[in-house]
Amino acid sequence: MPTYRDVAAAGEFRALFGGRAAASAGGTMQMLAMAVLVYADTRSPLLSALAYLAGSLPQVLGAMTLLAVADRMPPRRLLAGWGLLRALAVALLALGVLPVWTALVVLMAAGAGDGVAGAAGYALLTDVLPGRYVLGRSVLNIADGGMQIVGYGVGGIVLATLGALPALWVAAALTVVSAAAYRYGLRERPARTSGRRSFRATWLTNKSLFGDSRVRGLLLAQWLSNGLIVGAEALYVPYAGRAAGLLFASAASGMLLGDAVVGRWTTPEQRRKLGPLLYGLLAVPYLAFLAHPATIVAAALVAAASFGFAACLGLQERLLEAAPERIRGQVLGLAGTGMISMQGIAAAATGALAITLPAGVVMAAAGAASLLASTVLLPHLRSREPSTATDG
């Protein structure tokens, strides 16, 4: 069984880790600073929320049109080059000369590219750590969570002392650090597959992936089971009020613990068997919110449920088995962008329902929906049928 020391010994993994951590911290600071900046200019909560989420919303568009690039460009060139372009975009925002709508367009364009770069990075992880993808992915997940906390903390300090524009300059600098880590820490590799980097290639490959029942089931499990639970998480503030921070912290702690334990201490076969149990754990604790438990009990339930997010590690491992090697970037990118999109849809849906229903009732309904989705998709998760997906 591979250990953390094994993955840390790989120089290219250290470059991926450092680049991912710097990019995550910078991205978090950018979202926070732009939300504050747009709200200060417009006094519009809607535009402020759009500025915060603008980098995530367009990833589904990138998944439909650009994901083929993740497998059709040399990964080091793509990751380092995109990091520099993204740093320039953030620097342009930091100049403070763009109108609000133009700034939102820049953020959305950057978000579409982020999905492609993320797909290329996760596909490269399978080459950097052959046979140890799950452990490496769990470490990157932990880095993402930790650096988001750092980004919020440092970003808040910079915002309070210097203002939003200096915070954006710090975010741009961190993005340059990320690009440098990729450029000088990764070795040059050829593109995973050849062919035109066209919208048509992306569309045809996506069509092939959805035409494969095994891949389709794995993708839907990641999108629906996980996304619906995030819909429940979106109601922590209406449920707990000022104590919502405890629920958010408990959810983050449970998720990081699950990534650490499942990523480090389980074998592929154990992850396959644990999958249904983890999907159940992800949803069942939320059913107790029908009884509106006290905050401390709710925090314990949330932490236990969030441990179940580790099911995603085994699911991604199954996706790598199911999809051809030459389109790994696209399938991993499709899994990630679809999940982000479903999280946004679920959060909007639960928020709308909570207008007329108690938050605890809606959270329990989201848990029941996640459990139902996992149950329906269980035959696909257990299937060992060979993949029929092809490169478009």
Image: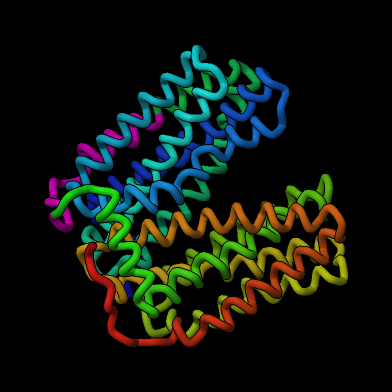
Residue 18: quarter of image: top left
Q: Position of residue 354 (x, y in %)?
A: 81, 56
Q: Quadrant of the C terminus?
A: bottom left
- In this rendering, would 29 be left or right of 75? right
> Residue, x 70% and y 61% (percent of image)?
232
Q: Is residue 314 visible?
A: no
Nearer to the camera, 77 or 38: 38
Q: Nearer the viewer, residue 3 or 334?
A: 334
For the N terminus, which image quadrant? bottom left
Where is residue 61 shown, x and y percent of the image? Answer: 43, 48
Tell me what residue is drawn at x 30 percent, y 36 percent: 82
Task: Tell which of 94 and 142 is nearer to you.
Answer: 94
Kindly identify the residue that appears in the image at 73 percent across and 48 percent down.
245
Q: Is residue 190 magenta?
A: yes
In the image, 119: left or right of 36? left
Q: Is residue 327 left or right of residue 4?
A: left
> Residue placed farthest to the front in the image?
200
How many numbered discs sit on the rendered protein? 0
Any magenta on residue 368?
no
Residue 205: give x, y in percent of width and height.
Answer: 29, 62
Splitting the image into 4 quarters, where does residue 300 fall? bottom right
Q: Residue at the spot x=62%, y=17% of the render? A: 161
Relative height, residue 170 to residue 295 (above, below): above
- Where does the magenta region start and end? 174-194
In the rendered view, would you say 91 is above or below 15? above
Task: Judge whether residue 290 can be spotted in this image.
Answer: yes
Q: Is residue 260 above or below residue 94?
A: below
Visual colour scheme = rainbow
